[in-house]
């Protein structure tokens, strides 16, 4: 963990200790807050100023190994959180979507991250889907496993829709507790005949489960540790004050139920297994652009 991340954890810990006393200032853009009376009610906690009302973030689950500089975006989503309506939304983009990657001709969209990291992925999303999220979060498989095991020591409760085996992990149909590696394999599996479509359903199921069950393990006092663990496991350009503001909303339990969208939408794609990239999904871009725009607005 670098010095900057250590400082963030220390400052967030101090926040919990001193909230309700005099105004305070966070480094890296945290605003000075007014005095607040001592309280155990998290709804009274001050929220940093200057936070956008609508926050859009590109989420990347990378298959890069620990020694790799980059991998492919095995999971690709666009997350939105509206702080006024408390509505979280999630757009899942199938990795076999065949798109134009600037400077590399057409390829599966998961190759954009491999070719040029976040900058090229963002340019690819802009060119093909007319979306420009200002923030990103990237996490590798191994960090995902570590993070889940740390934050959910008893596992994550999930109702598996079928039985299967992937990378040495056996999953039986039905409700169960999944550790980090089991949860990862559940989210990655696509051998059920639905391919990427089935996998996206499982990924969204995992996100929903984490969202609901995190409320059981994350309290106000645990917020610094939770944010600290996440900051040590991800690559992101999200300002610390945005993470804090969303974290406080989360602790107060104010979010609406998660809404999801899968891309490509129904009737907007065709299979093509005769391309330099192998089997792909050819998209009708305008229809999918309109679907994303309508969903996020």
Image (spheres, rainbow, N blue to C red):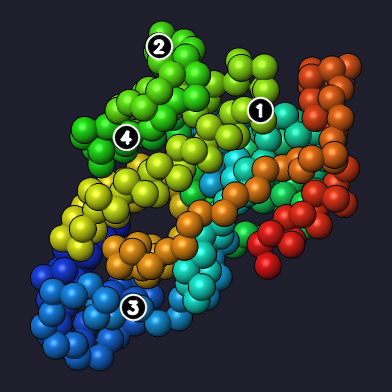
Q: Residue at x 24, y 80 (%)?
A: 44
Picture coordinates of residue 186, whole percent (x, y): 46, 24
Q: Answer with the quarter of the image where residue 93 lies.
A: top right
Label 2: which residue? Answer: 170
How far is the residue under mark 1 from the one under mark 2? 20 Å
Of marks 1 and 2, which one's residue comes earlier in the chain?
A: 2
How far is the residue under mark 4 from the one under mark 3? 29 Å
Label 4: which residue? Answer: 156
Image depth: mark 2 or mark 3 in front: 2
**Total residue callouts:** 4
Label 3: which residue? Answer: 47
How far is the residue under mark 2 from the one under mark 3? 44 Å
Is 291 placed above or below 99 here?
below
How far is the residue under mark 2 from the one under mark 4? 16 Å
Q: Residue at x 67, y 17 (%)?
A: 193
How far is the residue under mark 3 from the one under mark 1? 39 Å
Q: Which mark is residue 196?
A: 1
């Amino acid at each position: 963990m670098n010095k900057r991340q250590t400082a963030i954890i220390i400052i967030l810990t101090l926040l919990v200790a001193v909230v309700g006393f005099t105004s305070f200032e966070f480094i890296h853009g945290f605003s000075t807050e007014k005095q607040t009376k001592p309280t155990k009610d998290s709804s009274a906690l001050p929220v940093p100023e200057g936070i956008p009302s609508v926050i859009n973030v590109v989420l990347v689950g990378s298959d890069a190994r620990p020694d790799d500089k980059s991998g492919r975006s095995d999971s690709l989503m666009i997350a939105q959180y509206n702080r006024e309506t408390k509505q979280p939304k999630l757009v899942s983009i199938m990795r076999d979507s065949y798109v134009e990657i600037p400077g590399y001709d057409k390829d599966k969209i998961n190759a954009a991250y491999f070719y040029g990291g976040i900058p090229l992925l963002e340019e690819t999303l802009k060119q093909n889907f007319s979306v420009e999220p200002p923030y990103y979060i990237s996490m590798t498989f191994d960090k995902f496993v570590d993070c889940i095991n740390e934050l959910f020591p008893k596992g994550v409760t999930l109702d598996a829709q079928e039985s299967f085996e992937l990378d040495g992990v056996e999953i039986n149909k039905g409700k169960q507790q999944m550790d980090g590696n089991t949860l990862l394999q559940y989210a990655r599996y696509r051998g059920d005949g639905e391919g990427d479509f089935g996998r996206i359903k499982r990924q969204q199921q995992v996100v929903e489960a984490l969202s609901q069950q995190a409320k059981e393990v994350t309290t106000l006092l645990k917020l610094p540790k939770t944010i600290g663990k996440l900051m040590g496991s991800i690559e992101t350009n999200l300002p610390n004050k945005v993470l804090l503001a969303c974290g406080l909303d989360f602790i107060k339990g104010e979010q609406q139920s998660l809404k999801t969208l899968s891309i490509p939408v129904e009737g907007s794609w065709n299979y093509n297994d005769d391309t330099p990239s192998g089997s792909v999904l050819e998209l009708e871009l305008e229809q999918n652009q309109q679907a994303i725009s309508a969903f996020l607005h």
